[in-house]
Image (cartoon, helix red, strand yellow):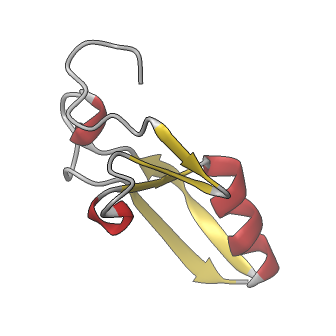
Amino acid sequence: MQKKGIKVNFRHNIVVYRTENKKEPESAVAYEEQYIRALFDKAELKVIEPIHYGSWSGRTGSLSYQDIIIAQKS
C-alpha cells in the first residue's frame, strides 16, 4: 500500500481488517489474504487459483476494481 497508483489507502487497522475511513469503515475494507483463506478452509471451501487482484491496488490488467476469489465446496 506504499506504492504509487494505489486508489485506496487502508491506513486504519481495526481488529481483523483495515479501512480507509474510520467514520465509515464499510466504505472500503481490506482483509489479509491469509485470514480470508483460513475462513474459506474453515467453511470447507477450496480457493480456485489464481486469486484475481483488483485494480484498487494500482495493478493493471485486472478483471475488476475489487479483488475476486472464486471458491467451491470441498
Residue at 67% across / 57% down in the picture? 15
Q: Nearer the viewer, residue 71 or 2?
A: 2
Q: Quadrant of residue 4?
A: top left
Compared with residue 54, is residue 4 higher up or lower down, i.e. above or below?
A: above
Q: Where 32 sits versus 11, above or below? A: below
Residue most toward the front?
23
- Residue 26 in the image, given as x and y percentages of width and height: 34, 68
Q: Is residue 24 left or right of residue 29?
A: left
The number of numbered badges drawn on the structure is 0
Foreground pick, 49 / 39: 39
Q: Split into 4 quadrants, where in the image is the C terminus? A: bottom right
Query: Quadrant where the N terminus lies?
Result: top left
- Asked where in the image residue 48 lies, by quadrant, the reply is bottom right
Front-most of residues 57 and 62: 57
Residue extending furthest toward the right = 42
Residue 12 position in % (x across, y down): 48, 42
Residue at (19%, 28%) from the top-left corner? 60
Q: Residue at x 40, y 15 (%)?
A: 2
Q: Could you tell me residue 40's position as x and y percent?
A: 69, 73
